[in-house]
Amino acid sequence: MASNRHFARIIVMQSLYELLHRGGDLDKIIERHLAQHEFDKNNTKFIYKLAQGVVDHMAEIDEVITI
């Protein structure tokens, strides 16, 4: 079974995929995914922080992975 942090990263990836392909509000997408699982407060904060960090640096990330 995956660790809580590993599973949290999966939730982030699913949420970001949905955001990029369907659009919408990232926080609402994450909330919907979190409603299906139980996470402690630290992991929930980690999920929001990681997802927002990716969105904030999307252009930089795209530059690195498209080389």
Image: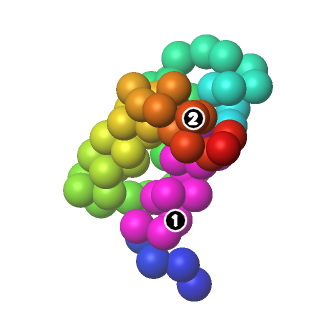
Q: Main secondary structure of the magenta part?
A: helix
Determine whether, in the image, residue 9 is placed left or right of residue 65. Answer: left
Image vertical order of residue 40 relative to residue 34, above or below: below
Q: Position of residue 39 (x, y in %)?
A: 38, 58
Amino acid found under the numbered disc labelled 2:
Glu
Q: Residue at x 75, y 25 (%)?
A: 21
Q: In the rendered image, which quarter is residue 4 located in?
A: bottom left
Q: Which mark is residue 63?
A: 2
Q: Position of residue 30 (x, y in %)?
A: 50, 36
Q: In the rendered image, which quarter is residue 63 located in?
A: top right
Q: Residue at x 68, y 26 (%)?
A: 20
Q: Is residue 30 visible?
A: no
- Classify mark 2: residues with Cα within 10 Å, few (<14), some (14-19) or many (20+): few
Disc 2, disc 1: CB below 8 Å?
Answer: no
Q: Which mark is residue 53?
A: none
Classify mark 2: helix, strand or loop. helix
Magenta stretch holds residue 11 = yes
Amino acid found under the numbered disc labelled 1:
Phe
- Please identify the quadrant where the C terminus is shown: top right
Magenta stretch holds residue 20 = no
Of the residues under marks 2 and 1, which one precedes in the sequence?
1
Q: How did the renderer colour the structure?
A: rainbow
Outermost bottom residue: 1
Q: Position of residue 3 (x, y in %)?
A: 45, 77
Q: Which residues are magenta?
A: 5-16
Residue at which label 1 appears: 7
Q: Residue at x 52, y 38 (%)?
A: 61
- Classify mark 1: residues with Cα within 10 Å, few (<14), some (14-19) or many (20+): some
CA gap between label 2 and label 1 equals: 27 Å
